[in-house]
Image (tube, rainbow, N blue to C red):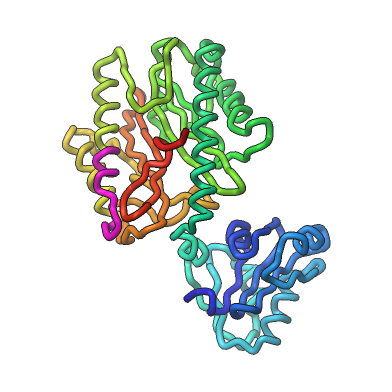
Amino acid sequence: MHKLKPYIAQNENALYYECGFSCDNALFLRFGTNEAYFLTDGRYVAEAKENIKNAEVIDAKKDLIKKAREIIKKAHLKYIIFDPLEFSVAKFDALSKNLNITFIPQKNFSQIKRMIKSKDELNLISQAVHEGKKAFDKFCVFIRQEGIDKSEEELFFNAELIFKHKGRLGLSFAPIIAINENAAKPHALPSTNKILKNGDLLLLDAGVKYQRYCSDRTRTIEMKNSATFEKTQHFKDLFRQKIYDTVLKAQRAAIDTIKVGVKASEIDKAARDVIEKAGFGKYFIHSTGHGVGLDIHELPVISPYADTIIEEGMVFTIEPGIYLPDNFGVRIEDMIAIVEGKAEVLNENAQ
């Protein structure tokens, strides 16, 4: 449906999805099935022409907006769709001023198009998950052999090196690595004063990009010589064990709820009910999951307010957590693909 409607985009992942190439200074215009334009400047024209087969590459020199206005005027359009989250007020004003057409705002226009993954996309995401799991395992060997007495900042530095695989892979996001009290902050920044010791709780949230598609995984463990990032974990402290087991139970409840036709909010509720019943509801302070693809955070959102109906080909995380301020936090995260109507846990299937 969207392919036949005229639209303009500038987000890099939106551009890549449309034509297999993107750069930091470009606009993409599509007016119909066989009429599309990729506007950029001289720095990227040669590479764009090498990679783009389904759009005309145009060197817009220094003024992409001016060239876009010229093309839009010649097309005699009645309207054009744009994502208001992509354009600044100044850029939108410059683009639309005195053009005798209607600009129709559609938030997350590209992400809505990308919500259902193709088989090729699912294969790339599965490979990203595979590479991410290998990096988790390699980082686990590192912390067992060299992690004791290193600060979060040092661990973070080494995690980046390991997950990048000597530059072969990109990072989905900067790894989150947190010890004890810092793990109670869902997006903790690495510190210099938190030093890893045996018996510490350690949370790692990280992912890689494979051919631009992201992976995302979180594990919470107790640091010891036999530490692994498997989901079965044993803590000496009984309270930590109780919290961990509650989060794991919540994740399993959410995954068991997933199937085609279910509302995203029902999945969130399944996880949230377990944590609330255990008495820790107020310490689960974020959504249960989010879509993953070219962006690390895509649609669908798995939250109490999400009325999205789960469909075949969707990919998203399930990541409940409990965060006890000034004490510790636990999060367990895996990526889910909807395959043949049911949930396939990608991280568990990674070899």
Q: Residue at x 64, y 78 (%)?
A: 34
Query: Measured along the vertical axis of the image, is residue 9 above or below residue 156?
Result: below
Query: Vertical placement of 84 versus 189: above or below?
Result: below
The answer to if 63 sits in the magenta stretch is no
Segment tinted magenta in the rendering: 251-263
Decide: is 141 above or below 41.
above
Using the rendered view, name the quadrant where residue 278 is placed. Answer: top left
Residue 259 located within the stretch drawn in magenta = yes
Q: How many marks?
A: 0
Residue 290: tell me if it is visible.
no
Residue 194: image location, x then y, percent: 49, 18
Give the vertical position of 52 relative to 122 (above or below): below
Q: Quadrant of residue 318?
A: top left
Which residue occupies 48% across, 65% down? 113
- Residue depicted at x 42% and y 16%: 227
Q: Position of residue 219 (x, y in %)?
A: 41, 29
Query: At 57% across and 63% down in the image, what residue appears?
Result: 86
- The location of residue 69, given as percent across then percent down, is 70, 79
